[in-house]
Image (spheres, rainbow, N blue to C red):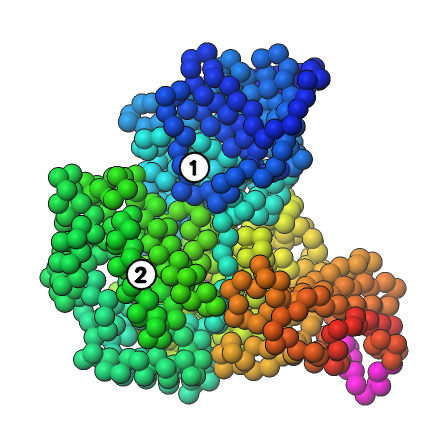
Amino acid sequence: MTKIYICGAVALLCAMAANAGTNNEINTVTSTGRQVSVTAVNPYIIKVSNHARESKSNESAAVNIHTPLITAQTTTAGRTRVLATSGGITAMLDTVNGSIVIDGGVPRVIGDNGMRRDSLNRKWVSVATMSNGAFYGAGERGYKLNLQGDTLIMYNKQNYGYTAGENRIKQMNICMPFVISDQGYGIFFDDYAAAWLAVENGTLTYSTEGKEDIDYYYINGNGSIANVVEQWTALVGRQQLPPVWALGYITSKYGYKTEAETRSVIDSLKRGGYPLDGVVLDLYWYGKEEDMGRLAWDADQWPDHKGMLRDFKKCGVNTVIISQPYILSNGRGADNFNYLSNHGMLAKDSLGGIHPVTIWVGQGGMLDVANPDTKAWLRDRYSALTDEGVTGWWGDLGEPEVHPEGAIHANGKTAREYHNQYGNDWSEIIFNLFQDKYPDTRLMTMMRGGTAGLQRYNVFPWSTDVSRSWGGLKPQVNIMLNSGMSGLGYMSHDVGGFAVDSANPVDPELYVRWLQLGTFSPVLRTHSTVDAEPYHYPQQEKILKSLIDERYKWLPYNYTLAYENAAKGWPLVRPLNFHGGNVTQDNADEYLWGHDLLVAPVLEQGADKRVVVMPEGSWVDYLNPSGKIYTTGDSVTYQAPLDVLPRFVRLGAFIVQADNKMENTGDFTASQYHIYYYPKTGYETSGMIYEDDHANPKALEQNQYAIMTLNGIDNNGKTEITATMQGNYPGMPDSRNLTFTVYRVNNKPGSVVINGKKLSARKWDYNAGTGSLSFSTNWQSSKPMHITVE
């Protein structure tokens, strides 16, 4: 089928008539009476609608661009209408049978034969692709990275205690009907209902239990996965800048049961010298398990919760508390259950009564977050608790974990139709609260359920109740990568593992290796039922403390990744081919942390080495940067004893790190950096660092930020570095104390010159053993700085 489409398209383009025009849409009514339209959403995105004539177009809950922003070129040649965008897309519509070819440049070509069918109580659509390569994304998928050859269930599902290799983690907590081809294009089927997506033999077949015909979107990345993700998140929404504390270390447990226990944990971490930015309180803050839905502090166990929240905040610790989608009738949430039930604010059955829900701790009802009254009731409670000092929110069980199929919601949707959307609508309640009442506060909401567009509500998802075992550790890279390419740039995991392996409840080696992965994950949050905190492992204390210190040292780099996520939708964790190249992975056990760092965690028990495959480019060992250069596709057996996390730096990179010891991210300052330069001989390269006041949620929209750009070139023993600063923000320092370390300096230089002034030899240090040169300077950043080493 694809070959026929492509040949026909080429012939058409060679013989098009000259009756061209400008419009953003081509459409037709086919010989069978179907209404077909192809719309240019922006230069890189095409929307395809194919509906029965009597049906109405489905209003999208996912798409964030509601009004087409561009004008495309349109042409008619015989029975074919053509739409072409400036972003390299040509779409050809057969006005008789409704078939479509969308060409984003070979091999980014798809064909749609125009046929739609209803069978097995589902609506179906298929598109043929030109290649049989890899497909990624589809939300949270842990069983492998490349989804080719699989049928993906689109119905959010919890998998308690999962491990690598289990078939059940094909279907996880956040499902999205969106996939990215390794050829650099994406397809989104605009549907939230229970559905299936078959990715087989170059064909994508989507079938849904939803009532409406399916629209889909073609996203052209012109061969780049990074470009696809940028356009995908432009379509469905991006996350705002995070609260900077969310990038620090957060402690969590199921659960801290009392105020006294929680204070003791914070004190122990601080006495132990661990930096700390947050604490997460599980369900015991409101009492016992059966009190779910109470949404009020248990005064017996938390006698001075307001004072506790104030005290934590004073020492830089932010408090996140849990809530769930259920209101139980068998505990101290019964008053809320009765009120919500009497006012029709819980999910109903087919007769209009409250649909009962049974979960592991009792019975009750399910909050109907499609109901405006329920939203208002929840918002009031979240607002009151936030006013008391709660800093962030944790939405648990939000797949929803238990969602009776007979339930009907206020929007008229059944559980099968609304299930995936539930987490988005729940997250939106908290997001809108902060937008309206706390517009100057950045939001962190932990949420484990939802679907396409979830990230626009400032959600920090995690991979839920993973097994506390080596089998639980292994799929986390796959999960972060597929989720990240789906728009969830902050997908992370319970560091250390959650669901305890009864045969081996405490494994110090596993904890160290998991914390190594967590240090270079979007959120570093330890969580378990036993021994969650690092001080429980005194023999490994030096390693663990150095890892958490490392997290803070990388804050300037990591905060710049947060900027890239907010500005472009790029995830912090990226596949090896994200920025180009042909090094692909079917199963991922290494990844790019931003553009310039390759992280290869050790995931096997007892391993003291591992094989690392190099992405596109030239790379050096982070721990020995003046050593051997590795290039695209090189396979390296790397020695990795327990205290070593294998990492490689891209040649040409500038890695900017904090140059001060921190107790929390409140100590993170733009006035003091250590800049490491890894020159690539003969090439001019650049890097950048993003800065703002760490507080304004709308810093980007209001242009209250600054970008430091670093350019470098190394030629014939002469190294030049230029630094410039553009932009401004409240509290921006006038000057910066900068320490530079330049690697791969083969001989002791004769001079170091900064803005025409030669540094005294006593003010720089050359280390022949590491091939590095270090020096410090104070930079008045209103003017460019030029450094010459030769």
Position of 614 relative to 60 (above/below):
below
The image shows residue 666 at horizontal and vertical percentages of 51, 78
Q: Which residue is mark 1?
A: 190
- The residue closer to the viewer here, 749 or 95, is 95
Q: Which residue is mark 2?
A: 379
**Which amino acid lies under the numbered mark 1 shown in the image of this protein?**
Asp
Closer to the camera: disc 1 or disc 2? Answer: 2
Please indicate whether residue 274 sits to the left or right of residue 123 in the image.
Answer: right
Looking at the rendering, the stretch of residues picked out in magenta corresponds to 758-774
The image shows residue 156 at horizontal and vertical percentages of 33, 46
The image shows residue 668 at horizontal and vertical percentages of 56, 77
Instruction: Calculate the distance from the C-alpha at mark 1 to the C-alpha at mark 2.
Output: 28 Å
First along the sequence among labels 1 and 2: 1
Position of 736 relative to 614 (above/below):
below
Residue sitting at x 75%, y 78%: 780
Position of 308 relative to 141 (above/below):
below
Please indicate whether residue 195 sits to the left or right of residue 558 in the image.
Answer: left
Please indicate whether residue 122 sits to the left or right of residue 407 in the image.
Answer: right
Q: Is residue 608 magenta?
A: no
Residue sitting at x 53%, y 55%: 571
Residue sitting at x 62%, y 12%: 78
